[in-house]
Image (cartoon, rainbow, N blue to C red):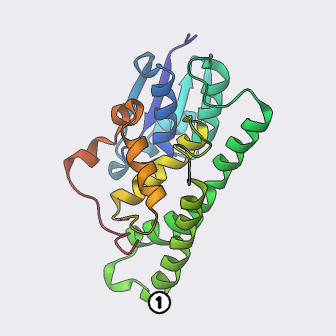
Amino acid sequence: MASGKMILYWGSGSAPCWRPMLVLAEKGLSDKCTSKRLEFSKGQHKGTDILAINPRGQLPAFQDGDVVVNESGAICMYLEEKYSDDSNRLLPQNVNERAEVYQRMFETSNIISNVQEPIVRYRYRTKTEDLDHGYLKEKTVKAKEELDRWNTILKGKDYLCGGKFTMADVFFYPYLALFVRSGAKLADQPELERYYETVSKRPSVQATWPPHWKEGPGPGTLSDL
């Protein structure tokens, strides 16, 4: 059970923010945690209240009583270590199985460096008339290769590490959902598409779906995928 007042500061549509929200939901802790949504567009994540607990002015930021934890992965691991039982574990107790989950968790950095940063973030921050289309063509090829790798990983599996939803899925799925939101069709990655449809139906995902995504379609920045 929760031992202190939990507060999660987050922003809608942020994959890092979505991660701890999923963990809280999977563990049945969402109603025990005060949810404070901030608007990135208004610079609320740079407010004095946030800077007091996270000098970097980044989200998510998390408090559990007197404990402050920043960085999405750290928050997820804190929640896993403190609030796990046999009904809601996201990390296997078997060390060999846990090693596979760890590998996929940290392997997720590759979709950030090969898809999120070079295409999604680049297009978001660059004016249309300033886009380097040669650069985008090159990065799109690498992005497809990255998605193909994950498609192979998922062959014959419901989730990244087999038949159970684990912390690996918590780390990976929010970025995949962001890519689909940004126009990725996954037509060449049927296993990845199946996985996306499966995980999207989980109660924890439905309960934490980014609010502003329900208001309309995404930007289409990954329509070539």
Q: Residue furthest front?
A: 156
Lateral position of residue 98 relative to residue 6, left or right: right
**48 vs 98, nearest the viewer:** 98
Q: Amino acid at mark 1?
A: Gly
The number of callouts visible is: 1
For disc 1, the marked residue is 134
- Residue drawn at point x = 50 percent, y = 15 percent: 5
- Residue drawn at point x = 32 percent, y = 80 percent: 128
**222 vs 132, nearest the viewer:** 222
Q: Residue furthest right?
A: 95
Q: To which quarter of the image does residue 113 belong?
A: bottom right
Q: Residue furthest left?
A: 215
Lateral position of residue 136 relative to residue 162, left or right: left
Q: Position of residue 139 (x, y in %)?
A: 52, 78
Q: Position of residue 210 (x, y in %)?
A: 34, 42
Relative vertical location of residue 217 with respect to residue 70 in this rendering, above or below: below
Relative vertical location of residue 66 with respect to residue 38 in this rendering, above or below: above
Which quadrant would the C terminus be assigned to in this image? bottom left
- Other-residue count near label 1 (Cα within 10 Å), few / some / many at <14 / 14–19 / ≥20: few
- Say what secondary structure mark 1 lies in: helix
Which quadrant would the N terminus be assigned to in this image? top right
**91 vs 14, nearest the viewer:** 91
- Residue drawn at point x = 58 percent, y = 60 percent: 152
Query: Taking the image as drawn, is residue 71 in sight?
Result: no
Q: Position of residue 107 (x, y in %)?
A: 66, 54
Lateral position of residue 129 relative to residue 61, left or right: left
Query: Taking the image as drawn, is residue 96 in sight?
Result: yes
Q: Position of residue 45 (x, y in %)?
A: 44, 44
Q: Residue furthest bottom?
A: 134
- Residue drawn at point x = 61 percent, y = 40 percent: 73
